[in-house]
Amino acid sequence: MAKESSFDVVSTVDIQEVDNAFQQTARELTQRYDLRQSGASIDFSKKDQSFTVSAPSEFVAGQVIDVLGSKLVRRQIDLSAIRWDKPQAAAGSSVRQVGRVVQGIDQDTAKKIAKDIRDLKLKCKATVEGDKLRVSSASKDVLQQVIAMLREADYGQPLQFVNYR
């Protein structure tokens, strides 16, 4: 009988690259003409893996998030890896917005991915293992078809395919 091949579906983000993008954004906030005196600020907590944007208005907060987004894209971090909450009113007329870095695949998303793989009706098996998903099959061609389907689908977070054996 043929040996089974497999790969893991994971969702990871390089926190050091995210921190570098944050540092560049903070520097640009002090240098860019339209944001310099606006009172906007951005903080990043490596422990919580979250951003906090404070700004005098939603428009300025949106500009800060756009600057951060451009720095993240330049460092090849998918923007869907950050989930932004709704803007909240803060002291005075300012707003605060929190964004969290998504690490790992939660159980609901993993079950949805496994169901989509089963719906392909291919000879493969998808099992949820913590915050990752293992797909195995006797045929490497089947695994390639599964990877192609997962690349086309949108699950609200970036997916990587590792440990392909």
Image: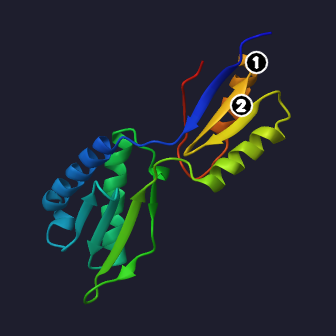
Extreme residue in the bottom direction? 92
Q: Residues within 10 Å of mark 2 (few under 14, many from 20)?
A: some
Instruction: Give the residue drawn at x 29%, y 56%.
Output: 47
In the image, taking residue 89 as reference, residue 130 lies left or right, namely: right
Indicate the position of residue 42 as horizontal and vertical percent values. 25, 64
160 vs 153, nearest the viewer: 160
160 w.r.t. 163: above or below: below
130 w.r.t. 50: above or below: above
Indicate the position of residue 58 as horizontal and vertical percent values. 36, 76
Instruction: Give the residue drawn at x 38%, y 44%.
Output: 73
Mark 2 or mark 1: which comes first in sequence? 1
Residue corresponding to mark 1: 138
The Cα–Cα distance between marks 2 and 1, rounded to whole angstroms, is: 13 Å
State if disc 1 and disc 2 touch (CB < 8 Å). Answer: no
* Amino acid, disc 2: Val
Residue corresponding to mark 2: 146
Indicate the position of residue 88 as horizontal and vertical percent values. 39, 80
* Amino acid, disc 1: Ala
Q: Quadrant of residue 129?
A: top right
Q: Residues within 10 Å of mark 1 (few under 14, many from 20)?
A: some
